[in-house]
Amino acid sequence: MTDRNHAAVKPIRTAVTDEDGIDFAIIELFFFAYRDFTSDPDQILADYGFGRAHHRVLHFVNRRPGLTVAELLDVLKITKQSLARVLKQLIDTDHIVQLQGPRDRRQRELYPTAKGRALALALARPQSRRIRAALEDSGTTERAMIERFLEAMVNPELRTQIGIVPAKMSGKSHGDH
Amino acid sequence: MTDRNHAAVKPIRTAVTDEDGIDFAIIELFFFAYRDFTSDPDQILADYGFGRAHHRVLHFVNRRPGLTVAELLDVLKITKQSLARVLKQLIDTDHIVQLQGPRDRRQRELYPTAKGRALALALARPQSRRIRAALEDSGTTERAMIERFLEAMVNPELRTQIGIVPAKMSGKSHGDH
DNA sequence: AAATTAAGTCAGTACTATTGACGTATTTTC
DNA sequence: GAAAATACGTCAATAGTACTGACTTAATTT
């Protein structure tokens, strides 16, 4: 297959659309939306020498103070080795502290410090502002709809990871940790 | 294990919620939703030895056949060097072909081949299925709402990148704002 | 002819992620 | 109490995706 003048490499000049029963419109919108959504905190993180991974760890430690390393790995769906470097940096810079588990002393419960809480809020602020702007003319119904849609986009078996923090709704809280 | 008993490193045991006026609920949902949304094609891509970057290139070349390298860089917001490796692989594997620009022969217009079109569709299929499932009980209004929300999440100055492909909106142009 | 532009390439670096292996402390099991 | 399992940390090696900067080639514009 060295010859490149075959039919196989003939250019297709028509664009894909939703013709094929595929929802390209929303696929593309989701990409753009997420790209810009994450660009907000990225700029703040750069000042700290942190990356997106630090943000995610910081977010979940603030959302679920006291969660263990194993639980964090489960939520982020990354490996221990990937987490190690990031977590170490956050601990060394006093954004996160580890406490020995009270029940099981092998475990390390992760808590944010005041500094870590402040950074988490600073990172979330522009994202929240963006969301608020996007929901500007929307009522409670519309907001609930967006939440329902996003939740439905999550794998069903992983949906337990969401409802962990109360303050939301849906009586599906089954007393975590 | 030096002195870590300062006030600055005292653990905060309460979780952040939407108390601080920050929309953690949607921030978190958006993270989970996008994580799982991209995990679908990731598994297919692995079979080809491709990554997420290949997917994005393939997607936009299929959505906008004939776009130039410069245009693609603008849409993806990455550098030429980052694109180079990925694009080369897609060309070498006959998923994408380059044609000399008719007006300006310095330009390289990018087109999908039949093979590239097929892969793009295969990658989009599970994502589209997920979206359809998430919108299962939803009507046109709800769908339009989601689209409007996602579009509003995109930076205004970059919103031009979206409406490029017609074939979707029938009569609704940009009449109002 | 000179400057600019589009694209490709080379070298070097950083971040995030991976797998595999191993060490240490602690808990559980027998 | 010894052995096995668990939670965590760490070392080494690798990959994918991104970055900056510098340079080349070809084509267009001035």
Image: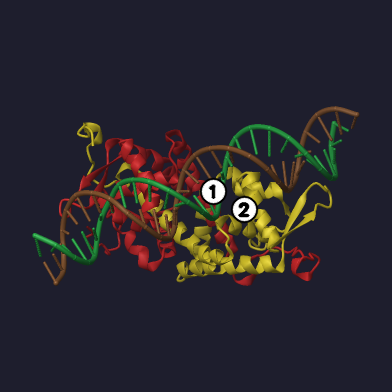
Chain colours: A red, B yellow, C brown, D green
Q: Which chain's residue wears label 1?
A: B
Residue drawn at (27%, 38%) of the image: A113
Q: Which residue is drawn at the image coordinates 36% and 49% (left, top)?
A: B24
Q: Find disc 1 in the rendering and name its residue.
A: B154
Q: Check disc 2 and report the residue beneath it.
A: B162
Is A56 on the left or on the right of B163, as rendered?
left
- The kind of residue on which mark 2 rests is Ile
Q: Position of residue B135 (x, y in %)?
A: 47, 67
Marks 2 and 1 share the same chain: yes
Locate the N terminus of chain B and report the quarter of the image it occupies: top left
Q: How many residues crowd mark 1 within 10 Å: few (<14), some (14–19), many (20+)?
A: many
Work out whether residue B128 or residue B174 is closer to the camera in this orientation and state it.
B128
Residue at the spot 52% in from the left edge and 69% down from the top edge: B126
As measured in the structure, the alpha-carbon distance from the residue carrying label 2 to the one carrying label 1 is 9 Å
Q: Is residue B10 above or below residue A131?
A: above
Image point (30%, 56%), residue name = A71
Q: Quadrant of residue A169?
A: bottom left
Residue D6: % across, % down: 24, 61
**Amino acid type indicated by mark 1:** Val
Percent position of residue B149, x then y: 50, 54
- The relative height of residue B149 versus residue A90 in the rendered view (above or below) is below
- Number of numbered callouts drawn: 2
